[in-house]
Amino acid sequence: MSREHLLNALLFQLNWFACVLGGVHDQLIWPLLTLSLMFAQIARSQFLHCDIFLALGAALVGLILDTFWVQLGILDYGTELAPIWIVMMWMGAALSLNHSLSWLQAQPMLGGILAAMVAPLCYLSGESLGAVSVDNSGLPIVAVSWLVVFALALRFAAGHPKKQAAN
């Protein structure tokens, strides 16, 4: 793993904690700071346009899916809509697709399966930190959603024209 990929992986993990703990304590400065650091880290990347598209797409998809899960009663953030910090977490995940998680682009279905296994655990970890309440019976819906979204995002990242031109 290159130094840039390692830095991206560390920022991705830091973003997760900053988002969850920022959500718990109503302090968006920490998720905003870590997301800004992730953007700064990829700013000179050949994938910048793809990364921006992925991050904005992830923000929209995350807002829709987490809000849908709230409406279904699977998740409870204490709000009707997905909170901004979870949307920033989705963006952080997207900013890893061309970097620390780029190795999954060759096998997007494997990436989707891994996401399906990890995402419910992340929500449960967020619950243990006080950021969300989770109805475990709905976690299979969350897992399948992450499988599809992550596999499609990896496929998009792998096929982005800027990336093809770089190869």
Image: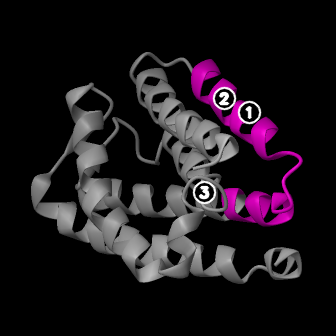
Instruction: Please give the name of the residue rendered at 59% of the width and 46% of the height, measured from the top-left corner.
Output: 92
**Viewer-proximal residue among 162 and 29:** 162
Instruction: Name the secondary structure under disc 1.
Output: helix
Instruction: Name the secondary structure under disc 2.
Output: helix
Q: CA distance from mark 3 to mark 1?
A: 13 Å
Instruction: Please give the name of the residue rendered at 36% of the width and 63% of the height, measured from the top-left corner.
Output: 115
Residue 70 image position (x, y, % from top left): 33, 53
Span colored in magenta: 28-55
Magenta segment, prevailing SS (helix, strand or loop): helix
Q: Which residue is mark 1?
A: 36
Q: CA distance from mark 1 to mark 2?
A: 6 Å
Instruction: Name the secondary structure under disc 3.
Output: helix
In the rendered image, which quarter contains the C terminus?
Answer: bottom right
Q: CA distance from mark 3 to mark 2?
A: 15 Å
In magenta stretch: residue 51 = yes
Going by the numbered disc 3, the residue's amino acid type is Ala
Q: Which residue is mark 3?
A: 94
In magenta stretch: residue 36 = yes
Instruction: Please give the name of the residue rendered at 42% of the width and 78% of the height, measured from the top-left corner.
Output: 148
Going by the numbered disc 2, the residue's amino acid type is Leu
Going by the numbered disc 1, the residue's amino acid type is Ser
CB-based contact (under 8 Å), mark 1 and mark 2: yes
Q: How many numbered markers are drawn?
A: 3
